[in-house]
Amino acid sequence: MAHTRILNTPSDLHSQDLAGTHKRAETVSVAPASNTLSTYDREGYVILRGLLSDEVRQAAERALRDLLGPTGRNNFEGFSTQRAYALLAKTRALDPLIAHPQILGLLKARLHAQPLLSACLAINIGPGETPQMAHADDGFYPDMRPDARHGLSVIWAFDPFTRENGATRAWPGSHLWPAHREPAETDVWRPAVMEPGDALVFHGGLWHAGGENATQDGRLALTAQYCAPWLRTQETMSLAVPPDIVRTLDAPLPSLLGYQIHPPFMGHVNGMHPNRLLD
Ligand SMILES: O=C(O)CCC(=O)C(=O)O
């Protein structure tokens, strides 16, 4: 039966899902502690320690090592660094990390309750790798204001992250810098020193870089980058992960992959909620 809705004001329009409601499974998120939020707000990043059980961490690590590709094609990917993309089409071992309740809680508190997964890739910085170019993940969008709600990124450690082996470098407070400021020689970075199973969570405006690896061993990480639901994702997730796979995923993974409506109708397919394609 067709539904008739009366829309009188722009806020009526923006608050309603005009592509039709669709059953939405509950997802579990954990509200961040106040000191986690204050560190994130002040520094632009926070490290969450020991979030994974041994079983989940080991399964994720095995999957990542199996999937690692060739070394990079440019000095941003890193000529001595292996990467792998489209991971959610290739393994289920990362699902608990991508939709980790603590990460969902931070996303809800600081980005959006219904974000998109913009990119999800493995990064294994190999011996001899040089420092990556400093960048901010929001820099991919034309409008990188300090107060913009564009993105939030996570880097999960699978090796100990040290200053020597390429721990991510972060410029504290740089998420608050004006739009065109870039790190100068005099701006001090800090290495995100972590143990396997720790997660570095940072604001999309934070200047950061993969570090130099002066050791003989790799430094394996998974990075998951999330963006607001009105932005284009770096990886086109709805093409990277086929519907037959998405159909098997638990909430909120389909929503993170683009099977969602941002009211009133961003993301519709033929006028309907994209989840109808999964029914
Ligand atoms: O590997 C890292 O520590 C950071 C990599 C990164 O920021 C990127 O490639 O976008």
Image (cartoon, helix red, strand yellow):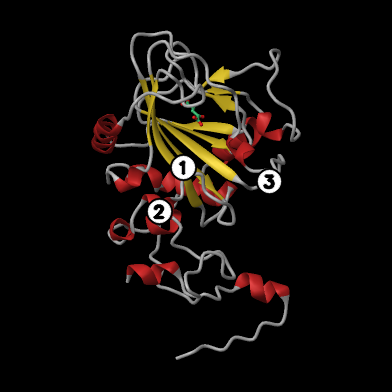
Would you say the beta carbon of the disc 1 residue lies within 8 angstroms of ligand 1? yes
Q: Of the residues under marks 3 and 2, which one precedes in the sequence?
A: 3
Crowd class of label 2 (few under 14; some 14 to 19; many from 20; radius 10 Å): few
**Which residue type does callout 3 highlight?**
Ala
Assess whether mark 2 and mark 3 are in contact (beta carbons under 8 angstroms). no
For label 1, the residue is 119
> Please, is residue 248 above or below residue 203 in the view?
below
Q: CA distance from mark 3 to mark 1?
A: 19 Å
Q: Find the distance from the CA under tag 3 to the CA under tag 2.
A: 27 Å
Query: Which comes sooner in the sequence, label 2 or label 1?
Result: 1
Q: In the rendered structure, find residue 226 and report the number of the disc placed on it.
A: none
Foreground label between 3 and 1: 1
In the rendered image, the quadrant that contains the C terminus is: bottom left
Reading the image, the residue beneath label 3 is 148
Apparent side of residue 188 relative to residue 74 in the rendered image (left or right): right
Structural crowding at the residue carrying mark 3, measured as other residues with C-alpha within 10 Å and reported as few (<14), some (14–19) or many (≥20): some
Q: Residue at x 27, y 42 (%)?
A: 93
Between tags 3 and 2, which lies in front? 2
Q: Is residue 204 left or right of residue 103?
A: right
> In the rendered image, which quarter is residue 173 located in?
top right
Q: Hey, which residue is sitting farthest front in the picture?
A: 73
- In percent of width and height, residue 273 lies at 46, 71
38 vs 209: above or below: below
Report the residue marked by disc 2. Answer: 239
Q: Residue furthest bottom?
A: 1
Q: Position of residue 19 (x, y in %)?
A: 51, 75
Residue type (three-letter) at the residue carrying disc 2: Leu
Q: Is residue 201 above or below residue 247?
A: above
Q: Give the image location of residue 251, x and y in percent.
A: 37, 59
Q: Secondary structure at mark 3?
A: loop
Residue 183 seen from this side: yes
